[in-house]
Image (tube, rainbow, N blue to C red):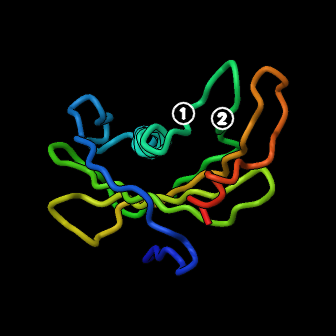
Amino acid sequence: MKFEIPEQKKLVHEMTVPIRWGDMDAMNHVNNTLYFRYLEIARIEWMHAIGAAPDPQGEGPVILNAFCNFYKQLEYPGDVRVKMYVSDPGRTTFESWCTLERTDQPGVIYAAGGATTVWVDFPAQKARPLPDWVREIVS
């Protein structure tokens, strides 16, 4: 099965994450929970890069849901190239998508996942409209 990012999604971030020996499980491949960690690392790095890090005393992004589809087993040693895309801004939410590939096998998708993100007023514990500057980035 081949994963393709539809055209309406915009590439916003790329990074490399090393596969650590401790990421492996008893089956000698990267444990499925670590794929979510790789997705999270890219998402958080991107949020910090655009100035959208969560502020517990103010506003910021919160993940509503997350998913990952597994296509091939990642194994140590190696490095994972994470490509992050965004799309579909709503009133308070947007979608993010990532592909995971080994740096020594560019273009071969090992896993793909994503998340729905909602913009939140943390003290009020309520969703807020996406700020215009965030909407511009994710549109």
Image quadrant occupied by the N terminus = bottom left
In this rendered view, identify the residue nearer to me: 29 or 16.
Answer: 16
Most foreground residue, 64 or 110: 64
Which picture quadrant has residue 136?
bottom right
Q: Residues within 10 Å of mark 1 (few under 14, many from 20)?
A: some
Q: Secondary structure at mark 1?
A: loop
Residue positioned most to the front: 133
- List the residue tagged with mark 1: 53
Q: Is residue 118 above or below residue 103?
A: above
> Does 26 sit left or right of 69 as displayed?
left
Tell how many labels: 2
Residue 100 position within the rendered picture, expressed as x and y whole percent measured from the top left: 36, 57
Q: Which residue is mark 2?
A: 60
Amino acid found under the numbered disc labelled 2: Gly
Q: Amino acid at mark 1?
A: Ala
Sequence-wise first label, 1 or 2: 1
Residue 82 seen anywhere in this rendered image of the structure: yes
Quadrant including the C terminus: bottom right
